[in-house]
Amino acid sequence: MGHDVFMDPFGSKTSKTHLLLYEICILAIGTCGAVTVTVPTELILGTVGQPLLLPANYTTGTKDQNIQITWTFQSQSSGSMLLVTAINNTLTPDMEHGHRFFLSPPSASLLINPVELRDDGEYTIKVTVSGVKVASASRQLTVHVNVPVSKPVVRSDPAWGAVEYVDNATLTCTVNKGTKVIYQWLKDGKPLLASSRHIFSSDNKMLFISPVLKDDLSNYTCVAKNPISVNESEPIAPNIYYGPYDLMVKSEPRFKVREGVFAVGKGEPVWFKCSANSNPPNVYSWFQKANNKTTPIQWGPMLNIKSEKVPEKADYMCCVYNNITGKRDETQFTLILSATGQERQKQKGSSLHSLAIIVGLSLSLIVCMLLYFFLRRYFPRKVIKEELYHRSPTDYIRAHQVSEEQEPPTDDYGIYEFVAVPASAEFQQVPPDKLNTVYDIIRVPDVHTTVYDVICHSPKTS
Ligand SMILES: *[C@@H]1O[C@H](CO)[C@@H](O)[C@H](O)[C@H]1NC(C)=O
Ligand SMILES: *[C@@H]1O[C@H](CO)[C@@H](O)[C@H](O)[C@H]1NC(C)=O
Ligand SMILES: *[C@@H]1O[C@H](CO)[C@@H](O)[C@H](O)[C@H]1NC(C)=O
Ligand SMILES: *[C@@H]1O[C@H](CO)[C@@H](O)[C@H](O)[C@H]1NC(C)=O
Ligand SMILES: *[C@@H]1O[C@H](CO)[C@@H](O)[C@H](O)[C@H]1NC(C)=O
Ligand SMILES: *[C@@H]1O[C@H](CO)[C@@H](O)[C@H](O)[C@H]1NC(C)=O
Ligand SMILES: *[C@@H]1O[C@H](CO)[C@@H](O)[C@H](O)[C@H]1NC(C)=O
């Protein structure tokens, strides 16, 4: 009996092959005497419904011997069973499982087609040669069979939306198909980590946000994966009610005097736009505060003011209200009407015109003065002298008087302009006593040219 126990450690099911295995070689080495079995990989992933090949090779040292290849399967649910065996290229399929397990000797690889979930487990290939001596070797492979994951679907609760700082939100990820699925959450494409407000269920299928904030307003995606597949949900953005935030009033920049103060010319139309960030959109209302009275004036984000119809100085207020969060905010500014505001605008409009005038005037002034100094320096005295030399003493005296009276140094200052004067014989005939100014003398009596008369607009002194 003792001998039997020693020889038969696997119990009553012990087959001859097991005995050989026990006697001759060690499983883990996979090689024994003249036989070597090799498998390229020990873990094989299978997809349900598809063929799965379990590759294996063996070598034997000698020829002229019987070769037996045996595949056995072992799993927790189905125990151990023989799948297929072949001796010298003659296949003996197992009657129970043989229709899905194929061996084509001399190849030792096993084909499972189609693979099923219950094929998940350990596979053992054993090759035995028996000639002069009996030798055997075996290797083990692990097969994981999975169903690919279908596209996950994310549901957000509460579906209508959550109010920030008040409500909690739950995102739940589900897949219709898939085995051994693990879940992962992405927020705007980046892995979402657990935090005091973000809690995951133990299987990671659920994300609990408590309480929700505006920051949580992002695109969430659930990634479901198993060893053979990855699938990603459509992004979902939970509806979060928040605000109002960042309230501000805008107008045309030219009206802004400083923060909260606008000035506008009387009669000029002006608009103000109130904006604040909120979900759902705010309800906007406008109030005017003047003479200690607050008057509601308009609804909606835009306020148009016709400035002739409002007080010279008044405060305006924009109120925003989020009717879901129940929060409100308001901002106030001052609008001042100014007469100058309008003039300034007009001036601006015609600035080009006035600039041209100023430039023109200054140029003519410069030219006038240059000309005047030029003439004064060279011509007048010469001309006067010439005239005087040919004149009678009375003329000389008169001319001298004219020169003295009409040209006191201070009288030269003023605004000068050029006037085109048709040159005519009249001027030549002007008697010296009718000369108005010293400049009349210098006119050249040339009928073919236009003569420019210099007129001096002196300040009226006498
Ligand atoms: C078995 O061995 C042959 C030749 O050595 C090689 O071509 C083949 O890829 C091997 N197959 C496996 C599954 O290792
Ligand atoms: C198997 O083949 C070997 C040689 O290839 C031969 O010697 C042996 O008799 C065969 N065994 C059987 C059972 O056919
Ligand atoms: C995701 O699942 C859908 C079916 O739900 C499938 O059509 C699609 O190919 C899968 N995508 C990936 C990347 O596996
Ligand atoms: C949100 O969750 C917290 C616990 O995390 C709970 O105390 C609170 O009552 C929940 N709020 C709502 C509105 O359900
Ligand atoms: C979510 O993604 C879409 C498309 O990329 C984008 O238009 C939308 O603004 C995003 N939503 C949020 C809350 O980031
Ligand atoms: C506005 O009211 C304050 C006190 O409420 C008062 O002192 C002030 O005189 C009032 N001004 C006008 C213009 O009525
Ligand atoms: C809240 O405000 C929105 C946007 O202004 C409006 O469409 C909605 O009817 C309001 N709801 C309630 C309950 O007043």
Image (cartoon, rainbow, N blue to C red):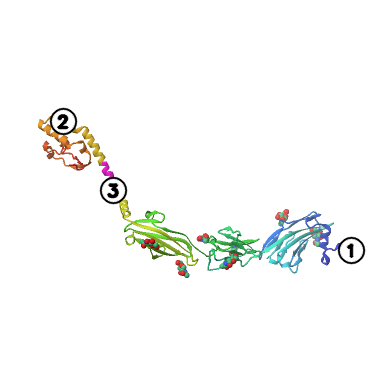
Disc number lying in front (1 or 2): 2
Residue closest to the far top: 389
Is ligand 2 less than 8 Å from the beta carbon at label 1? no
Q: Looking at numbered disc 3 in the image, what kind of residue is underneath it?
A: Ser
Secondary structure found at label 3: helix
Can residue 213 be seen from the camera position used here? yes
Residue 442 in percent (x, y) is at: 17, 35
Residue 134 in percent (x, y) is at: 83, 58
The answer to whether 27 appears left or right of 344 in the picture is right
Q: Looking at numbered disc 1 in the image, what kind of residue is underneath it?
A: Gly
Residue found 43% across the figure and 63% down from its top: 319
For marks 3 and 1, the one nearer the N-term is 1
For marks 3 and 2, the one nearer the N-term is 3
Q: Are marks 3 and 2 in contact (CB under 8 Å)?
A: no
Cα distance in 3D space between marks 3 and 1 = 128 Å
The span shown in magenta is: 357-363
Is ligand 6 less than 8 Å from the beta carbon at label 3? no
Main structural element of the magenta stretch: helix, strand or loop? helix
Residue at the spot of label 3 = 354
Cα distance in 3D space between marks 1 and 2 = 164 Å
Split into 4 quadrants, where in the image is the N terminus? bottom right
